[in-house]
Image (cartoon, helix red, strand yellow):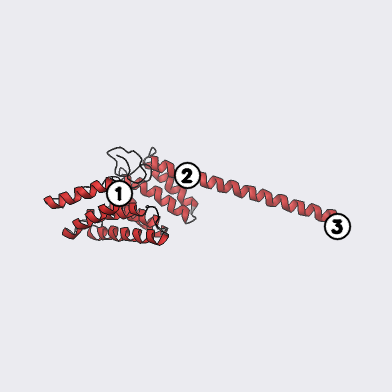
Amino acid sequence: MNCPLCGTGNNYESDLCNQCGRPIKIGESDFLNDELLIRISQIAQHNFRQGNFLQAINDISEYIEIVDTDPGAYVFRGKLYDYLSYGSNLNHREVRNILTQGIEDFSHAIFLDPNNTVAYYNRGNTFLARKDFDFALDDFSKVIYMSSDDELNKVMSYSLSAFAHEKLGDLDQAMVEHEKALSIDSKNEFAISLRDDFLRRNMNSEGSFKKLFLFCGTLILVVIFFYFVIKS
């Protein structure tokens, strides 16, 4: 199944894209026992797969007007807002407002189902996109606590926690989180990609610092040399 956002091909058993970590499959709902609801859900999921996110939002909103106690519907719409925020020609305020709508939906899903790890994971992802790193870490920690090691969300949450820690300047903890992700699934492409990107960024930073240190040291030696030449 191709990811509607980045286009990466994924295994049909996967719920999350191996490349960008975004959801590629919408789970089944316990409320789909009515022909009209089933039809609305099918139309919304069709538009989702086609990348028509705004229309899919309208479709699932129609569903929510009929059944407003289905956490899966709020998670679905929250995911759609997340995808919609990647649209072109959006300014910073528009993107932030769209992401906020997604966060509200994920929060409502959690209100309806406090143990919904999918909602926590997606809300953490959206907080990350909004650069609210502390809130993202709080949600990812809940996913990690409530998930077993065989759940993909747990590996992803460790990797995304590492990214958040890096952005907050805690590089040591970021590396710890990367190692935890890969200790669960050493072949996970998403976890490997984020860990390798982290190492490249920080190796480059370290190399730049060393070059700056050597330059400053050389400059000091030159100044001292000319000082004694002039003095003599």
Which amino acid, mark 3? Answer: Lys
Give the side of residue 232 with respect to residue 39, left or right: right
The residue under the point 28% across, 45% down is 50
Q: Nearer the viewer, mark 2 or mark 3?
A: 2
**Dot 3: within a 10 Å radius of its alpha carbon, few (fewer than 14), some, or many (20 or more) residues?**
few
Rendered image: mark on residue 147: 1
Q: Secondary structure at mark 2?
A: helix
Sequence order check, earlier mark of 1 and 3: 1
Q: Secondary structure at mark 3?
A: helix
Q: Disc 1 and disc 3: Cα gap in Å? A: 71 Å
Q: Nearer the viewer, mark 2 or mark 1?
A: 2
Between residue 52 and residue 162, name the one nearer to us: 52
Give the side of residue 101 with respect to residue 71, left or right: right
Q: Disc 2 and disc 1: Cα gap in Å? A: 26 Å
The N terminus appears in which quarter of the rendering? top left
**Dot 2: within a 10 Å radius of its alpha carbon, few (fewer than 14), some, or many (20 or more) residues?**
few
Between residue 151 and residue 77, name the one nearer to us: 77
The residue under the point 32% across, 59% down is 103
Sequence order check, earlier mark of 2 and 1: 1
Residue 62 x, y percent position in the rendering: 20, 57
Asked whether the beta carbons under mark 2 and mark 1 sit within 8 Å of each other, the answer is no
Asked whether the beta carbons under mark 1 and mark 3 sit within 8 Å of each other, the answer is no
Rendered image: mark on residue 197: 2
Name which quarter of the figure residue 120 lies in. Answer: bottom left
Residue 90 x, y percent position in the rendering: 39, 57
The C terminus appears in which quarter of the rendering? bottom right
Rendered image: mark on residue 231: 3
Which amino acid, mark 1? Answer: Ser
